[in-house]
Image (cartoon, rainbow, N blue to C red):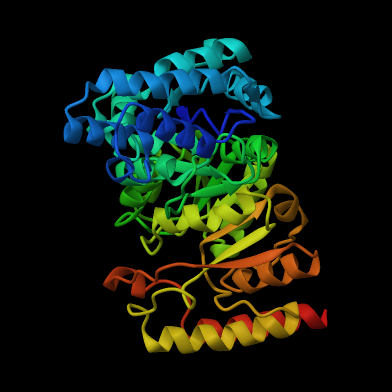
Amino acid sequence: MDVKLVVFDLDGTLVGAPRPFAEIKEELKSRLIEMGISKEIIGDMTPMYENLLRISRETGRDFEELYSILVELEAERIGDSFLFEGVLEVLDFLREQNVKMAIMTRSSRKATLKALEMQGIGDYFDIVSTRDDVPPDDLKPNPGQLRRIIEAFGLEPTKVLVVGDHGYDILPARELGALSVMITGHTAGRMSFSVDSTPDFEVEDMRELLRLLENLLSTYVVVPAYNEEMTIGAVLDDLLRYFRRDEIVVVNDGSRDRTREIARSKGVHVLTHLVNRGLGGALGTGITYSLRRNARLILTFDADGQHLVSDALRVMKPVAEGKADFAVGSRLKGDTSQMPFVKRFGNFVLDAITAVFARKYVSDSQSGLRCFSRDCAAKIRITCDRYAVSSEIIIEASRNRCRIVEVPIRAVYTEYSMKKGTNILEGVKIALNLLFDKLR
């Protein structure tokens, strides 16, 4: 994937400390009470910084006087801080990959710089953004803090990955369109409250994050294309928002139109069959090429505009996280409002036939949106040239004991894409091909 910048949270993500923030909050409350501020005005103090601003307004007390207490408590806490295991390996890997790094934290600048100096990791980051560096209305979870970082690097948000341990890290990423990773297993340093958020990826700790990054930065996208001049340009533009040009592989399957020329104009890899070999032949060529390029993940994506890149990221998720070997985007488990009844019925029949041979039921065996781990892709032997390959892949993945999951996706149909794919005649051919293959 085309990740050019990783923005890390600090507390709870890179560093932890034995003293939890809940204790800091209680100490802050006690100090405020000693200053003569009532418990009613103090309230719950969640979150602390914003509530200090409120208390200053309500009481007329000098904000800097109140704020200095919080800064002092944070700096004391950081004195016992430690790096989580695997942090240096992650930072070194990103540096080797020429990926820029930044810090986005709600901590004070004093505490942040103290932590970075103590742990010896300050030199990894081009930008360190603390709560003292942005207006209160920009501080995460508001998007302004992250927007300032992204604009300083001159990047599009889709080229940015935000890594944190709290919903406050994920919310600005989602609002701006950046990718996000939630670290779920770090408890030391996590804020004393939680918010609902949905990250693009989840990992337990830094060691899992390293594996995730290795997978994401070596993901190839295989796009089989036959006479797709009407849609291939827009499809590639969408993919290029998140994926690198040299990791998008268009297999021009003997097209007689301008498919090859349009794809080449986008700067992606274009492999051309001199004659039309069918979907199976195109997928086989693309997957083999990706494996030879040492792809760790392989995503297949139709060229007719039927798939959404946002769904592709969701299909990648379980494989990139190491929780599955093969993921299938299921239109039958998602929004089927645009999926014609004939196609739903035809898919159901083919799913049933596929399940007989695979000994595993997949609700959308004909889906063109799939993600393979390298090991799983290397085990799949494609012999069917035409549409039967979709069922064959399911059968091969099951036979080789790949861990298979389904991910709900949206079925997007246009008048153009309706003419593509399987129909009743193709369904009969697929069933016969599978039967003959099984009897051989």
Q: Is residue 150 left or right of residue 166?
A: left
Q: Is residue 55 left or right of residue 85?
A: left
The image shows residue 25, relative to residue 436, as above or below, that is above
Q: Does any portion of residue 385 appear in the rendered image? A: no
In front here: 274 or 238?
238
In front here: 48 or 293?
48
The image shows residue 379, relative to residue 38, as above or below, that is below
Kindly identify the residue that appears in the image at 53 percent across and 44 percent down.
Answer: 182
Residue 167, position as x, y percentages in the image: 44, 46
Q: Residue at the right extreme? A: 440
In front here: 24 or 398?
24
Kindly identify the residue that appears in the image at 32 percent across and 56 percent down.
Answer: 231
Kindly identify the residue that appears in the image at 61 percent across and 28 percent down.
Answer: 17
The image shows residue 104, relative to residue 240, as above or below, that is above
Residue 398, position as x, y percentages in the image: 75, 69
Quarter of the picture containing the C terminus is: bottom right
Residue 388, position as x, y percentages in the image: 61, 74
- Where is residue 242, by image quadrant? top left
In front here: 404 or 140?
140
